[in-house]
Structure formats: structure tokens, C-alpha cells
Image (spheres, rainbow, N blue to C red):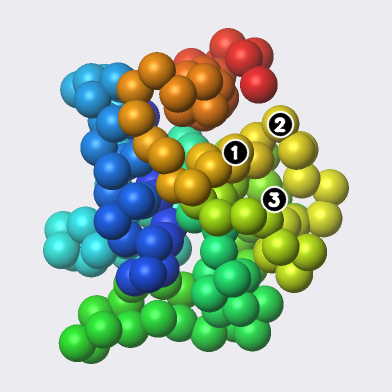
Amino acid sequence: MKCVSFLYTQSDRTKAERLKDLLQAKLGTVVDVKSIEEMIAEDQDVKDELTSSNCVVLIGSRQASSLIQNNKQEIEDEFLLFDGSLISEIFTAEHGKLVIVFFSKKDKNDWIPPGFDSNKIFHFRDGEIRRGNPTLDQFEDCIKGILFGNDRV
């Protein structure tokens, strides 16, 4: 089964889970879409899951960028929610399966790997995540292209 992993901070959780749920509904049962929290709940090794995922969606924000750039983690009640050092380690050089989503205005200090394809960066203005949104359609097409080998990016 194909897998899409979602990476987001606690502050981006509501919108990230909305986007994740819409993507799962669109892709159906042929793709497993999950977060770090779900990986841990299933006793899976996060690094192994991220490196073996077919696609990884990073929700970009000031907080996420700060955690990545400073190699820090976000932990709540002893549970890992976001691992900036792991994300930096895995995706700085090898970012072919990475897609970045912003719910707020992109900032010049936001973390984007060097040489990253700008066609795989999506901006949901004002956090508007709903069916019929052209950005959502483009995002879904990009994910499908990565998963199924169709060059839709």
C-alpha cells in the first residue's frame, strides 16, 4: 500500500488534519495517509516511516521552520509531535518526495530545502481548505503524480 506522511506542529494541527482527511477521502483505501502521532500510536519507527513513505507533506509555518532550522523537537505529554532535526536530516538533500504546504503567508525565513521544486509548494490563503478550491485540486494532483508516477506537478 502507498503511504503519505503528514508532518505538522501542534499549532497547525486543525488545518493539517482537515487537509489530511480530505486527501485520504480523495485517494481512498489504496493509500494510507498518516501523521507522526499515528505512526507512534502504531509503534512504528518515525524515521523508517518517513524514509519509506512514498510522499511526505510538510506543513510549513514559522514554528515548523524554527524547529527544523534549530534541530529541535515539539513534544507534548512525552509524545513526539514534530522532529525538526529528523526532517532536516532526511529532507535537506533528498527532497524528491516532499511537498510543502503553507496556511499563512510564506515568510523569507521559512525552511525550504535548497533546490526545492517550487511547483511542490502550495499556499492555502487564509487557511481555506475546501472542495472546489483550485489549490486543493493542484495539491491532490501533485500527490497523485508522486504516488502513481504521473507527472502532474
**Closer to us: mark 3 or mark 1?**
1
Residue bearing mark 3: 94
Residue shown at the point (77%, 45%) measured from the top left: 116
- Please provide percent x and percent y for residue 1: 29, 28
Q: Secondary structure at mark 2?
A: helix
Q: Secondary structure at mark 3?
A: loop
Q: Mark 3 belongs to which amino acid? A: Glu
Residue at the farthest front position = 126
Q: Quadrant of the C terminus?
A: top right
Cα gap from disc 3 to disc 1, whole angstroms: 19 Å
Q: Mark 2 belongs to which amino acid? A: Asn
Number of numbered discs on residues: 3
Residue bearing mark 1: 122
Disc nearer the start of the sequence (3/1) = 3
Q: Mark 1 belongs to which amino acid? A: Phe
Disc nearer the start of the sequence (2/3) = 3
**Closer to us: mark 2 or mark 3?**
2
Residue bearing mark 2: 119
18 or 54: nearer the viewer: 18
Cα gap from disc 2 to disc 3, whole angstroms: 16 Å
Q: Secondary structure at mark 1?
A: strand
Circles 2 and 3 in contact, beta carbons < 8 Å: no
How dense is the environment of label 2, judged by Cα within 10 Å: few (below 14), some, or many (20 and up)?
few
How dense is the environment of label 3, judged by Cα within 10 Å: few (below 14), some, or many (20 and up)?
some
